[in-house]
Image: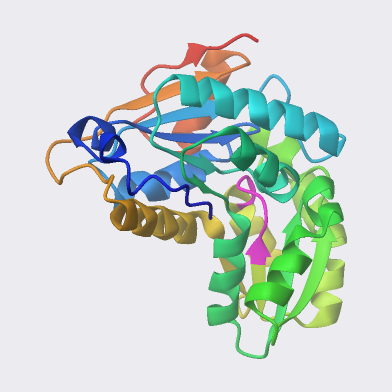
Amino acid sequence: MHTPNIGSDTARTDASVRAQPIGVFDSGVGGLTVMRSLIDLLPYESMIYFGDTARTPYGPKPADDVVKFSIEISEMLHARGIKLLVDACNTSTAVALDAVRERTDVPVVGVIEPGVRAAQRATRRGVVGVIGTVGTIGSGAYQLAGRRYAPDVELVCAACPGFVEFVEAGDVDSDEVHALAARLLLPMVDAHIDTLVLGCTHYPLLARTISDVLGPDVVLVSSADETAFATSRLLGELGIGTPSSGRGRHDFFTSGDPATFAALGTRFLGPEVESVQTWRW
């Protein structure tokens, strides 16, 4: 997490700042799993979500492109008056979080550290698997976070190319998805993991398929809830949380087709996705 020095600036902690929205972004609709947890935990907070569906998936893209995209999105959300930013994309968190933090003066929360901490609490034997996109796993960010926050845990990491594309297409339980999961998760089966970190916000939609492959004894950990808790704590520490009254406003933007985003969004988030606005660069 990034905590700018805003506590001493009374202009940043008055009622107008507390009423400002939280910004949330992802390469597509997967980050809506994080937003779901945020809404459930912080129903009074307003939020703006951006899904970069025109350029998804981020996983196979060069790191420089992911950094560029992440900065563009963070600046767009910052211009709309957010008080805190949640990078709900594992690939972006892995390769672009530092660059995003350098470009904004609001607190920034990523999804990798919360996921590792949750896995450390969940594991029984200290053998934890992590699956993510090629970009996320190749960055080494989870391995670094493991050494820093869970040094007693053995991490087994594997990229799962193709998962995001199936989820974005709305296919989470076909025979093709099962076959792909059985092949990609073989390293986890061979390592006898007892806990698996879903290192991509799209992957919770594949939880049933993943559990079918790994068996019921493997605990699946999504960083969504842990990221929401981290966000809530930071709002409280900085004194910028919205007072507990009313319901927050939720706005949605996409770089792609708004109708497709809305259809998929209801599966990831629920009825809150009432309308989606298009954003063009």
59 magenta-colored:
no
Left or right, residue 5 beside residue 209: left
Residue nearest the viewer, comparing 263 with 18: 18
Residue 93 versus residue 208 in the image, above or below: above
Residue at (31, 37) in percent of width and height: 12
Residue at (31, 49) in percent of width and height: 40
Q: Quadrant of residue 184?
A: bottom right
Count of number-bearing discs: 0
Residue at (53, 14) in percent of width and height: 258
Question: Which image quarter is the C terminus in?
Answer: top right
Q: x%, y% of residue 42?
A: 29, 48
Q: x%, y% of residue 123?
A: 60, 83
Residue 29 versus residue 140 in the image, above or below: above
- How is the rendered protein coloured? rainbow
- Residue lying at the far bottom of the rendered structure: 125
Residue at (38, 47) in percent of width and height: 38
198 magenta-colored:
yes
Q: x%, y% of residue 193?
A: 73, 80
Residue nearest the viewer, comparing 61 with 15: 15
- Residue lying at the far left of the rendered structure: 245
Residue 101 versus residue 151 in the image, above or below: above
State the extent of the magenta-drawn residues as a range: 197-203
Residue 265 shows up from this direction: yes
Q: x%, y% of residue 59?
A: 79, 41
Residue 262 shows up from this direction: no
Residue nearest the viewer, comparing 189 with 173: 189
